[in-house]
Image: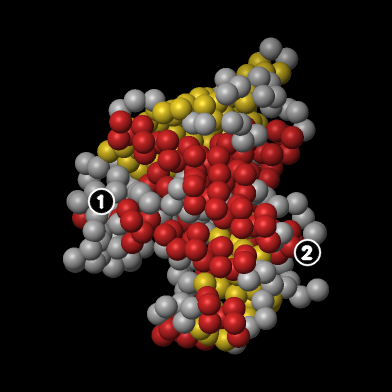
Amino acid sequence: MTIKIAIVGAGGMADYHIQGFRAGGAEVVAIADRNIEAARAFATKQNIPEVFASLTEMLSETELDAVSIITPNKFHKPLAIEALTAGVHVFCEKPPALSAAETIEMRDAATKTGKTLMFNFNNRARPESYAMMQYINGGSVGKINSCQAVWMRRTGIPGFGGWFTTKALSGGGPVIDLLHMIDLGLYFMGYPEPEYVLAQTFNDFINDKSFKGPWGIPDVADGVTDVESACHGFVRFKDGQVMSLRNSWAEIIKQEEVSVTFQGKKAGGMVRRLFEIDGDDDTSIDSCELYVQENGCSVNKNIIVAKDESMGRVRSATNFVRTIRGEEAPLNHIDDAVKLMKIIDAIYKSATSGAPVEIK
């Protein structure tokens, strides 16, 4: 059967979503954006037949099976619930919402309607992650006791005064924006139940334009910049597993690093991307390694996989289509999203209070 999908939001991630949907055999039939001219331009570029100014208008006039939500974070929850209630499946950009409470509302709507709700946790769909999960699921690693989740940028503030730096629209800075490695570490660990979080955020460079990222997002002169620029934290889980985390848009480090390193009872491992130039996927260097003891020797195994500059963004969208069709298992579940957002909430709460936060 042909899956008919519409896009909500003509932002940069839409290109990846569309590539993935079409690779899965879906038909992209419409796009909606409040900036109707941007929507028309994008529709022309991507050969999308219908253009609308809102999701509400689109749902009333077009027959759809699913929608893809690519908007500022504040709008994820209301748009997802509107779409689910209208009887269509939803693929939503990260983060799931502004908080765990909002994510639970989305879960309830998906449960009530019986529709699929998935999120673009695209790093699970990287070739490196698929390969590593084969070792983990095959028993080569054993229980993962600890992991280190890192997404650190030296110059990566995505514009000043826009929605990324406005907490009311984004929910926060790099903690919530760059949550991918926290999610991937949890994924490798089996998404254990979190117990405590201790974290500290920093905003030393959040108003320093020399730390702006290279993506061309325009500054908004009268806008708001009220989010963190960096965070370091620690999570303890109920079964004794632990995770340390480092997220930054602006911190004085050698180069941008995106990685998860873990230590298991049988083996350790690492999935990592290093950027020669901040944010430039063309110059990135990927690693996927497993560390074991064999015949009394320390052995490091280099796992060779195909290069994917999109970091799984295309494959993640394809998985959504195949999940709807029943051809693949979903790469993520809404219960994972709730746990992740509980950790994000606790990070911000701990950073504000200066004390550990228990997660219930």
Q: Is residue 70 toward the left or the right of residue 203 in the image?
A: right
Give 93 or 102, whichever is nearer the viewer.
102
Label annotation for residue 226: 1
Could you tell me the amino acid type at mark 2?
A: Arg
Residue visible at 67% across and 38% down in the picture = 132
Q: Is residue 201 above or below residue 38?
A: above
Where residue 192 appears, x then y in whole percent?
61, 31
User: Which residue is identified by label 2?
Assistant: 325
Q: Secondary structure at mark 1?
A: loop
Label annotation for residue 127: none
The residue sitting at the front extreme is: 112
Q: Residues within 10 Å of mark 2 (few under 14, many from 20)?
A: some
Q: Secondary structure at mark 2?
A: helix
Q: Is residue 270 above or below residue 76?
A: above
The residue sitting at the top extreme is: 296
Occupied quadrant, residue 154: top left
Occupied quadrant, residue 290: top right
Give 56 or 145, whichever is nearer the viewer.
56
Residue visible at 57% across and 20% down in the picture = 240
Occupied quadrant, residue 222: bottom left
Whichever of callouts 2 and 1 sits on the residue coming sooner in the sequence is 1
Residue visible at 57% across and 86% down in the picture = 50
Could you tell me the amino acid type at mark 1?
A: Asp
Where residue 239 appears, x then y in whole percent?
61, 22
Q: Can residue 81 be seen here? A: yes
Residue visible at 30% across and 57% down in the picture = 166
Q: Quadrant of the N terminus?
A: bottom right
Where residue 64 appears, x then y in whole percent?
67, 76
